[in-house]
Image (cartoon, rainbow, N blue to C red):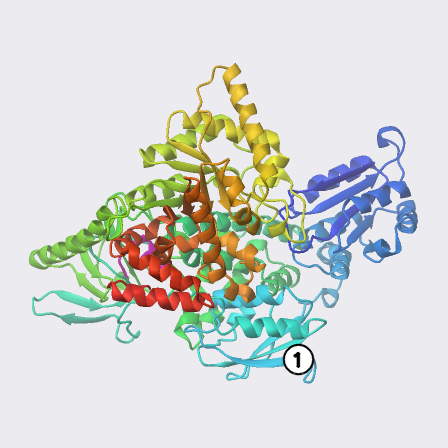
Amino acid sequence: MVWSERFGAKGRKQALIGLVLVSHSRWLAEGLMQLIRQVAPAEAAIAYAAGVGADHQEIGTDALEIAQAIRAVFSDSGVLVLMDLGSAVLSAELALDLLSEDERQKVRLCPAPLVEGALAAAAQLTLSEDLDQICQEAQQALTPKQSHLGFLSPSALPSQPSVPEPTQDAGLSIIVRLENPHGLHARPATQLIQTAARYDAQVWVTNLERHTPPVEAVSLNALLALGATQGQRLQITARGKQAAEVLSALQALIPRWGESAVREETPSRPLTDREAGSLRQADAGENLLQAIPIAEGIAVAPLVFFGVAPEETISPTVLSPTEEWQRLQTALQKAERVLQARYERLKGQLGEEKAAIFQAQQLFLRDPHLLDRVRQLLLESNLSAFQGWKQACEEIANSLKAAEDAYLRQRALDILDVSRLVLSNLGSNQVEPPQLSEAGILAAEELTPNQVAELDPQKVRGVILVGGGATSHSAILLRGLGIPAVGGVNVFALGLSDGDWVGIDGATGLVWLKPNPAVRANLEAKAQKWKTVRQELLQHAQQPARTKDGVRLVMAANVGSLIEARLAAQSGAEGIGVLRTEFLYQNRSTPPSESEQIQVYCQLAEVLKPHTVVVRTLDVGGDKSPAYLSLPTEANPYLGLRGLRVSLCYPELFLTQIRAILRAAERYPIHLLLPMIATLEELEQVQQLLLQAHETLSKMDVPHRYPIPIGIMIETPAAVLLAPQFAEQVEFFSVGTNDLTQYTFAAERGNPALSAYNDALHPAILRQIQDVIETAHQQGKRVTVCGEVAGEAEALPVLVGLEADELSMNPHVLPKQKAILEKVDRRAARFLAQQALGCKNAAQVRQLAHHFLEEIGMESG
């Protein structure tokens, strides 16, 4: 019997190694598959060939079925075959003869024990693309059992895998100097690893100033441990078929590490650790502490202490190393899902750059050096998954705490943050985010990015940290949430209690302890003034957006949750320009029902009424697919089955969403938006399905709106060229500049080595936007620009000059963009846009726009 499973393929640059189980017994194979589901990654491709005769009830193996199973899970990465005993081995060898020569080269018959070997191999599938290495891991699967029962001497235990270093004259090398402010920190190190992984080469990095030994560019922690700061030189050595190519890519990446030109948000007067925490008396007699400014703003409120809950101290029963490793894999997968969800939510609230810490934390979970160290602790020290993971993470954090550079020392908190997230899945007490019943100022030794992400700004008026710094990831998130904060003050040692009043100024770093009534009243007045200024900006944003000369321009928000919709309403959004419906489909085992979707769409529309909500239909692909769709693994998912193509391949799923949108549109002003459309035939298919949904609802006498205003995303050059024909059949266009830029330059925007191409203010993109707007206006249709560029200050006057009808952006930038718009004269903006169209590159456009903003008294940063 041949049975294959792909546990929810999610799309990878390279498909995982396939796994085939060969057994005399169908029941044994099915039971083993149940075990493997507990440890196999979601995208694993696994098949079994087991039993013979009718319904495969009889004991035996069949070479033809084994060959079929191999082909069912075959990929360029190869296939590992495990067998139980005797004739199963002979049948597997015969199956190889039935394959082509090319196929045989990528198949390994593994001598490992079937059950233990299969579990070990399944757990390794996402950790290695080396077929022989996974085969070796499977062969070592009996070692823990043998050791436990006394059949193996300690010297025979597998040692920690060592990282090979390049020989002195091996490969090619370049020397680069770090120019970015914080050197080789988490985000640049992540980009270095991702870039190196795209080439067939091994890459090592050495810090020449500190004379460190070379570390391989596969481990985030190893790269951070280099302690490389601004101005220091790195030697990067590469060896392999694409050594020259990877060095060229890294040479292009390193000057700016793919970071945007937006200035880092840091306080104007950062203090040294010595300056922070000094107590002094002011003229009014109040007690003042000089702290480190973290996030601007003034707050005065009762103090609320937050202590980290103690971790589980009761040692759990330690299982075999293999079983403990499997427990860890499950915990890591849960943690990765949590981090991805937080990234998606914070990206909508604060923007992609601020949310990127949660992507770096996901990479930490997959760090090969860290996992090797945990594996060593499980095997050699007989530790549990909890103990091994905790010890390995603390070792890395301690090494960062000892770094000379303060910025690197702050990264230790990020390591412990993600460590605790995994430990909570392994039995530790869950460290819940601080929850305040009344408004107060939170005092904590530290707050991790994951804890900050859960704070309620309505209750948490301010934050005082013992540790922390202006450049920490937590600080970046606090600023994005508008919560004043200071650091470097050990309030736990000052004799204060819950409920004692304190005041803070996040811009100057001043902290007032138990202010007397007069000081407290003064602080309250200052805090109120700061809130008023901030609130005025928000309230002013509630007015319809207009240029200085009175031209109306709708400013809407890109939204992906109910929380974001509320933030958008508070920030002055004049509707939802793009409702990303993917949040309804992700992190669940079944798709959302029609009634569930109706409820959510109506809730969102209620928050933004009477403004329009533009609902974009499901926009997923092989790289971000719900598990239940089982989309195929593709060599290049960005050019594969994604966007509208997925919906058309799953018509019942699509019809459910269409019916929900039509029914919700009967109650609220809701429009329908189609993602990544490329041909007129695709639009015709959608129109047929819309008609089918309408007829179904009509027969059932279900109230709904039909026809409904339809728009399409302009995200491909094909859509730009076909805009005249599309404009005849739709009511509006939405220009998705992120994907349009990616497809125009054939440069994946997730590739940091190609970040120079990822700028939507390039004249090549601006000319396409101009063509689309002119085409649409000739036929009386409206155009929205809804990519990241719509929220950039420098882009605003250019897009106004191109005569876009609407801009849709992340909610948090709406007030600022509306304030800028009021200073922009449409005629001057048109002249700027014409100049921009004649520029050679995006840098020239940005320089022009920067000068334009300076002339009208606005900042571009």
The x, y position of residue 414, in whole percent, is 45, 61
**Magenta-highlighted stretch: main secondary structure?**
helix
Q: What kind of residue is marked 1? A: Leu
Within 10 Å of disc 1 (Cα), the crowding (few <14, some 14-19, many 20+) is some
Image quarter of the C terminus: bottom left
- In the figure, is residue 760 to the left or right of 141? left
Which one is in front, 281 or 819? Answer: 819
What residue is disc 1 on?
A: 172
Task: Write the residue at 55% across / 54% down.
Answer: 386
Identify the secondary structure beneath mark 1: strand
Image quarter of the N terminus: top right
The x, y position of residue 480, in whole percent, is 34, 55
Could one spot residue 181 in this view of the protein? Answer: yes
Quarter of the image for residue 248 reads: bottom right
The magenta segment: 476-485
- In the figure, is residue 128 to the left or right of 2? left
Q: Indicate whether residue 480 is drawn in magenta.
A: yes
Quarter of the image for residue 468 reads: bottom left
The x, y position of residue 288, in whole percent, is 17, 66
Which one is in front, 446 or 817? Answer: 817
Vertical comparison of 839 with 114: above or below: below
The x, y position of residue 22, in whole percent, is 83, 44
